[in-house]
Image (spheres, coloured by chain):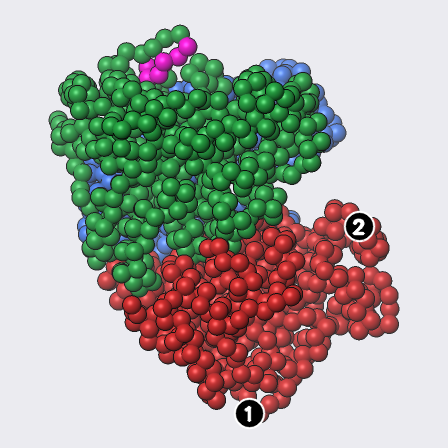
Chain colours: A blue, B red, C green
Amino acid sequence: MSQPIAISPDRLLPADPGTRRIARDLLQRVQDLPIISPHGHVDAAVIEHNTPFPDPAALLVSPDHYVTRLIHSSGVPMDRMRASKVAEPDSRDVWHQFCKAWPLFDGTASGYWLRTQFSSVFGLETEISAETADASYDAISAKLAEPGFRPRQLFKDFNIDVLATTDDPLDTLASHEALAQDATFHGRVLPTFRPDAYLNIDSKDWSENVDRLIATAGDGGTGYGAYITALENRRRYFVERGAVSADHGVRTPATLKLDAADAARLFERARSGQATAQDRNDFEAHMLYQMARMSVEDGLVMTIHPGSYRNHHEPTFNTFGADTGHDIPFAVNYTEALRPVLQDFGTINDFHLVLFTMDETVFSRELAPLAGFYPSVYLGAPWWFLDAPDAMLRFRSAVTETAGFSRSSGFIDDTRAFCSIPARHDASRRIESAFLARLVAEHRISEERAHELIVDLVDDSPRRVFKL
Amino acid sequence: MSQPIAISPDRLLPADPGTRRIARDLLQRVQDLPIISPHGHVDAAVIEHNTPFPDPAALLVSPDHYVTRLIHSSGVPMDRMRASKVAEPDSRDVWHQFCKAWPLFDGTASGYWLRTQFSSVFGLETEISAETADASYDAISAKLAEPGFRPRQLFKDFNIDVLATTDDPLDTLASHEALAQDATFHGRVLPTFRPDAYLNIDSKDWSENVDRLIATAGDGGTGYGAYITALENRRRYFVERGAVSADHGVRTPATLKLDAADAARLFERARSGQATAQDRNDFEAHMLYQMARMSVEDGLVMTIHPGSYRNHHEPTFNTFGADTGHDIPFAVNYTEALRPVLQDFGTINDFHLVLFTMDETVFSRELAPLAGFYPSVYLGAPWWFLDAPDAMLRFRSAVTETAGFSRSSGFIDDTRAFCSIPARHDASRRIESAFLARLVAEHRISEERAHELIVDLVDDSPRRVFKL
Amino acid sequence: MSQPIAISPDRLLPADPGTRRIARDLLQRVQDLPIISPHGHVDAAVIEHNTPFPDPAALLVSPDHYVTRLIHSSGVPMDRMRASKVAEPDSRDVWHQFCKAWPLFDGTASGYWLRTQFSSVFGLETEISAETADASYDAISAKLAEPGFRPRQLFKDFNIDVLATTDDPLDTLASHEALAQDATFHGRVLPTFRPDAYLNIDSKDWSENVDRLIATAGDGGTGYGAYITALENRRRYFVERGAVSADHGVRTPATLKLDAADAARLFERARSGQATAQDRNDFEAHMLYQMARMSVEDGLVMTIHPGSYRNHHEPTFNTFGADTGHDIPFAVNYTEALRPVLQDFGTINDFHLVLFTMDETVFSRELAPLAGFYPSVYLGAPWWFLDAPDAMLRFRSAVTETAGFSRSSGFIDDTRAFCSIPARHDASRRIESAFLARLVAEHRISEERAHELIVDLVDDSPRRVFKL
């Protein structure tokens, strides 16, 4: 029994009719503004080469850890959805798994984004269901085969103004350069410096990564000094190619200022595999401090994404690799952890430090008070599991009374799912409108100011915070 | 001045008229479904013997730690409400204390359940008050004396389908067997294996308990090996008598996999009173891991109820015993604690691990992400202090966007107050309806799907998760 | 472009029309009740001497760390707003900075209080803006110059019944005595005993403070014994001059019962600068226990305000001193920390222990369960960053279902901004009305009971809890 896809123009707006009326007007104000995406995981090469999208499953299911994890939780083995080191699933079968599992997504953020895409991007008129799996597979496939349904055209159709990617420090950024020089392409695709694999001693192949880093950019030196120099050089390389930020996916936001000799000693100990757990923690905290110091010097906005226990289920990691749905958050504190950095750089206006969290408890307790004093500190938009309607409202409720609206980063989609970008930004705009509408309805801000604020949140904030 | 008891048919439903209309329809869908109670503390013998209920105070006040704690907080000494080791309070006086204290319960979950019972179960027409204490005592007493007002008739009137009790591993389960064989009784009363007193070294008489356990079920062996064997044997005994779950009231959910020799060494050290605090923690974490391993083998659903500082006020414990209102929650983390178990058993579909918490911060941060990946992990319904309308809505808001609706356990009443069971399940159904109605009103799910989901949450989920 | 200031009579009330109607009626019930302020930071001497208020900036901007911190976060250096050790800013320039920054305050608690003051206390008719900075400066200045615009007249106009100050243990309390004996002054201005600087070993000049304390009130003794005696003596001095409470701004609520010899040993070690971090923690936890013991003996209500990392940004502290906007909260636990005190004194009805927090996570997890059992424990009103409309609603939602309404302290304004007192109490009354109105609309309490409860929360609770 097939149902029409229902995408109400009032979706995500408050139920109270008076408040909804206010929210609708606010939304209308920003609905057609261009998309600014200062942090995400789209591959620049795909845009450069205007690579056609693969089949529906390979586009929308297999690579999306939000989607495969929930289907997996219902008992479907991961190898029915994802390529492992030894086998690849059949796309049509993956799609069938997905369609059968579709009811699991009711009420989830992923379900919301997918339904919106199905309707708005792929033009489906029928709700996904197991019964119609082949029909929806074929309909989306046909769409994907259309000549206009390529990354560059969608980039334009989606009204994307700026899109930042996330890149390895040794990436040549050739695709970014090619796009910048391509007179036929009008968007901005900017690289982001992401040095985790060179800073986190526990990452796979850390020492080999460091070898390559020093060899590539160490100005012929060796040891800790060349390591620092190479990082500075590669950051400059990124800045010259349009990067505006450096991103840090650390376990915790601990920072520590060591003198160079102590840091060098820990570095050598780690290089020779002799570092204790304490050594590693200290060295990484020191390097996060160093990244802040470099951001002060080269102007790259510093974003921190901490608090995820990566690859919680080792057998899944061993077979399917990282980013396969079992990174699990844990409690993180910022107040004490960031003090060394904030003592030294916190009041430098041009240093922008954007703090993200998956631990909601720090919204009101730590992040809003920090951002409400330090000119360098900005509230990162609700991230990952919190990038969802109710969670975004909880974020605004928790931070606004302390920090107002001026200290937040603007929406960040953080996605590798290119076709979901409009749905995500649209959802954020709806929720910001809903929140502001409530404040208007409760006579806490004027409707006129709300109309200014919604534009500020959607358009000005990300440009200002990310120096765009 | 006596007031009529007001029990609105719209109680707990959202105030917004449009949303309320949706919620009403959802509620209607499930209002007459049978009660499934997969975890609680009713005594099976009371049902077996169809024991008449005692007087109003001994039924509704003295044994209910939710009730006596709040009266106690207002300054009434505990011995005016509860039997101590040396004295027993007069029931009518207890009832007077309660009626005088009744305004304290405004806005509380306990007050809500009690008022609902007074009206729906006991047929009172007048609100409880100090002035009418004798009248209400007499009215309830008269009801309790009616021949139809016995456990078996109420079991039927309450429309209870399944009721699980909580039992000592050495319990003979005679009452459960008698009920199962009684052709005149049509409900299911199932035992639950609760081995805390045999696993937690700090519990009163742990070593004596272990002696009895090994003597009863250790197959003639001694030491750690016989201890493990005895636990396995008693679990089998429970399974054979209808048990579907094993419950663990641990301090923290820490788990640890030790090899048998190390575990045996810690066991012996604890038996001889030589165990350090670290030894005890390690042993208990190891035993929680063993319980998971046994659940994988024998199929008992594993439920974990951690994070309560039991018997916080020692003088009250010494005089009145356990479960007297001063178990106080504290912060607990699950992400790291459960990793050893989830590494080994997390992706076994038939292993069901239901996680409860009184620390709301883990709802969005840890539990929903865990349940949204591991097929074994289920979200336990809001528990204890969180088993209340606003808290239940916070739970749904915190977990649904990540884990959807399919990963939750269904409502658990966790009560020893038999007459409160319908009020508790009714409250839960109202709140689930309220939550779903909001999603419908915000165009996040269709009304048709909400009608399917409400039935799933109330009826299918507990059957599926608890293998009923 | 100048906008009128909009102060709706329905501000902060729920948007749903039916619920708002109920809230309006509740608010009306308490809108004219006198203000009871059992904890704050107004200077008694200002009231005694009826000191004229300074200029607008020195009254409303420079001393208010809520205000300067947010302007500072926008990049305005602190010395443009606050006096440092070497310079003082020009008042009119400070006011210009403030007016320019006014849009930052949209949605904040501070913005709400200020706007209300501008309209209700200063009679401004035009919204603050950079363009009208001089006009608003002049209008407020003119108001401040009016003979009736003095502390004593405002005290009366604001309808303040009781106002507690916060005082150093060695303060002579001369102003309090003068006011008490002044037949022309009808309010009550009560001192509060705040011994942090004498208990916290890390505070500036602790040892010198202790010298002065012992010299003043140690009955001629020396060492730890005289220290304890002196504290007891000064508390008695405060009690005799009307104090009803002792306030403790501790880092954590840890308590510890040491015997006198051990305590004396730690005391001497600290006095000679030999104390380790552990020694200091133990000594301070012991002294918090001692403060509880003294409260039991002398009847002073004990209030605890823990969990703030004071002076997070050392350079700002070094230049501008304490209380300049960079005290940042962190996670604190109460369940284990307070156990020593609650074991010994928790069930003494006349001991009143009011617990405040900036860590919302403990509302439902720890504070409500503690206050719902121990007759001594009261829930402090939402404090500091949480003293704001949404946060106050979260507080009520988090605690009421467990602890009801009887266990909360009533509103505490905690302010040094005298002219903001009516706006703060008014906001609290609106939010309490909003919360109760929702419970009525959801048929959880009767409208009649809500009308009793709102009076209890606003008027009776603070009198009862603070023994006024």
Neighbour class for label 1 at 10 Å: few (<14), some, many (≥20)?
few
Q: Chain of mark 2?
A: B
**Which residue is pictured at 55% across the width and 51% down the height?**
C347
For marks 1 and 2, the one nearer the N-term is: 1
Quadrant where the N terminus of chain B sits is bottom left
- Disc 2 designates what residue? B275
Farthest residue in the top direction? C86
Q: Can I make out residue C72 in this image?
A: yes
In terms of secondary structure, where does tag 1 sit? loop
**Which residue is pictured at 46% across the width and 46% down the height?**
C378
**Which residue is pictured at 74% across the width and 69% down the height?**
B232
Q: Is residue A345 left or right of residue A230?
A: left
- Disc 1 designates what residue? B184
* Quarter location, residue B263: bottom right
- The answer to if C80 sits in the magenta stretch is yes
Q: Nearer the viewer, residue C261 or A381?
A: C261
Q: Chain of mark 1?
A: B
Could you tell me the amino acid type at mark 2? Answer: Ala
Quadrant where the C terminus of chain B sits is bottom right
Q: Position of residue A367 (x, y in %)?
A: 44, 34
Above or below residue A63? Residue C145 is above
Q: Nearer the viewer, residue A44 or C45?
A: C45
Span shown in magenta: C79-85
Q: Position of residue C22 (x, y in %)?
A: 23, 56
Above or below residue B66? Residue A177 is above
Q: Position of residue C234 (x, y in %)?
A: 51, 27
